[in-house]
Image (tube, grey):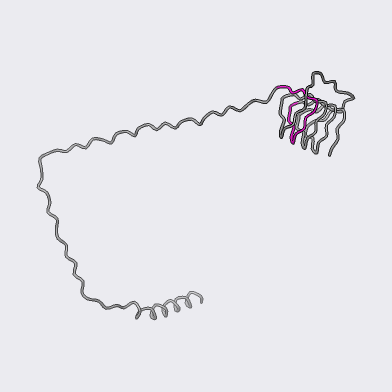
Amino acid sequence: MMTKRRSWVAAVAGLIALPIGWAWGDNVRIEVTPQPQPPPSSTTVIVPPPAPPAPQYVPAPPQVAVPMPPQTINADQIKANQVRADTIYANRIEADQVFGQVHQTKDVKIRDTRGEIKAPEVTAATIYADEITANSVVAQHVFVRDLRRR
């Protein structure tokens, strides 16, 4: 039923559009002038094969020297947004988040600690600190006497 209706609508639309498409015009004449052919020649033309493309060398990206973090950090205090290490030894840690295995100990004996470190991020293989204050502490093992979450 729908196909009959569509066919009928298409036929009516075609009949309505038919008078609009008629146009009158003058006669058009197209003339083609043949091009003269060159006389056959006895000369043989040899076209050499195209040269192989020149090899393109892409330079290697520049090497950027990324400083390696120190193997061990000894500090009285560390204040940072994030402290990262494989192992951390500290008497006191105050942090929002601590990721890693935490080992509570009675006392962590830290020798040769010097100074205070303030940085956005502190990273080392091993960190020895009397006190660490950070937003997050990330380590595989954290040995700490006093752990406080903020």
When asked about the image quadrant of residue 34, the answer is bottom left
When asked about the image quadrant of residue 73, the answer is top right
Q: Residue at x 35, y 32 (%)?
A: 54
Seen as rendered, the residue at the extreme right is: 106
Magenta span:
71-86
Image x and y of residue 78, in percent: 78, 29
Does the magenta-highlighted stretch encompass residue 11?
no
Residue toward you, 129 or 48: 129
Would residue 108 appear left or right of 32 to someone viewing this image? right
Residue toward you, 18 or 121: 121
Would residue 72 appear left or right of 19 to someone viewing this image? right
Does the magenta-highlighted stretch encompass residue 82?
yes
Q: Residue at x 80, y 39 (%)?
A: 96
Residue toward you, 44 or 8: 44
Q: Residue at x 86, y 32 (%)?
A: 147
Image x and y of residue 100, in percent: 78, 32
Q: Residue at x 47, y 75 (%)?
A: 6
Location of residue 105 with respect to 120 vertically, above or below: above
Seen as rendered, the residue at the extreme front is: 115
